[in-house]
Image: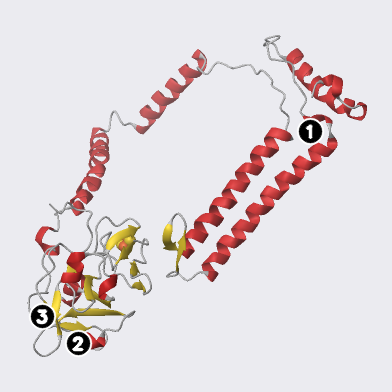
Amino acid sequence: MSSQEIPEENLPLAQDTAHVAVEHVEDDPLGDPGLPAHKPRVQDIDERAARRSERTVALLFTLSMLATVAFIASFVIFPVDKIVYIWPLGHISALNFALGMTLGIALFCIGAGAVHWARTLMSDVEVADERHPIEASPEVKAKVLADFADGARESAIGRRKLIRNTMFGALAMVPLSGVVLLRDLGPLPEEKLRKTLWAKGKQLINMNTNEPLRPEDVAVGSLTFAMPQGLEESQHDFNNEIAKAALMIVRIQPEDIKDKRELEWSHDGIVAYSKICTHVGCPISLYEQQTHHVLCPCHQSTFDLSDGARVIFGPAGHALPQLRIGVNDEGFLEALGDFEEPVGPAFWERG
Ligand code: FES
């Protein structure tokens, strides 16, 4: 809107704004810096428009507050293992989705409110400001150098060579601690994650009952955890061994199994996969029976057990290793060998 269109009742407001610009230019010791004349915005000349902008900004800040309340409420409302389907993201954790959305909205509304406030209601008069030299004056420089020389003289660092040399030595050696910590990046696990206690003929033992599993013990829709026969809790390396050998057993209708190798390595729809997440090794424990997805609670990696346990979401880089199983003469489930791939985290090069 040009100054000719300014309603009479708003003229004082527009004139005030223009006056500010003129004042700044007149005060400027550099003279006219060549800034264009200030054009009043609609909010500068129309009080109702200014109030509308004020309400918009307040609305955005209020939305931000509500989103923060929703963020806190999400912790109470959504269980950590609740998986939902959201197009186009697919199956994801409801809690993570709610937290991300509400936090995003809260931050966005604060930013949008601040920008709208600045663009419509804060002064938009451009002013020129004199830039002062950044370099210190010769007097200040001389004083700093004199103070430094005084400090060095008073600390006697030049005279007390023993202190000076040991101090430099200590300062030079401290970073070595950080270098030593790098040792923990190696050695690579190599064979340690390639071999577990599973071997041909080892029965699958139910970790809840400590009894060998029969096919009829595994119902469709249930998730059973198993360990190798002969691994007793009393063994001193039980934790190490179970951390590599723990299995998840589920039964899927054979016609629902999409992966051909998975079908061949299963028994009557019963499939056995490593329970150790291929991201950084958390134990997987959440199973969604309709979709046959399992979810790692640590960083939400999700694997499809009906499709070779491939990763369908999250940071894991590899499918879960499958154990080939069958049934022995006594009718118990048994392993037909060890895993054919390393179990657990895949951040190291598998070669
Ligand atoms: S350890 Fe499983 S997703 Fe990170």
Q: Which mark is residue 202?
A: 3
Q: Residue furthest right?
A: 8
Residue for point 39% across, 24% down? 149
Q: Position of residue 119 (x, y in %)?
A: 68, 33
Q: Position of residue 314 (x, y in %)?
A: 35, 57
Amino acid type at mark 2: Arg
**Marks 1 and 2, the one that precedes in the sequence:** 1
Q: CA distance from mark 1 to mark 2?
A: 78 Å
Q: Secondary structure at mark 1?
A: helix
Q: Secondary structure at mark 3?
A: loop
Q: Position of residue 60 (x, y in %)?
A: 67, 48
Task: Determine whether, in the image, residue 65 is placed left or right of residue 157.
Answer: right
In this figure, which residue is indicated by the disc labeled 2?
A: 214
Amino acid type at mark 3: Lys
**Cβ–Cβ below 8 Å for labels 3 and 1?**
no
Residue for point 36% across, 27% down? 153
Q: Quadrant of residue 284?
A: bottom left
Q: Using the image as rendered, state which of residue 135 and residue 150 is in the foreground.
A: 135
Residue for point 44% across, 63% down? 93
Q: Which mark is residue 43?
A: 1
**Marks 3 and 1, the one that precedes in the sequence:** 1
Say which of marks 1 and 2 sits in front: 2
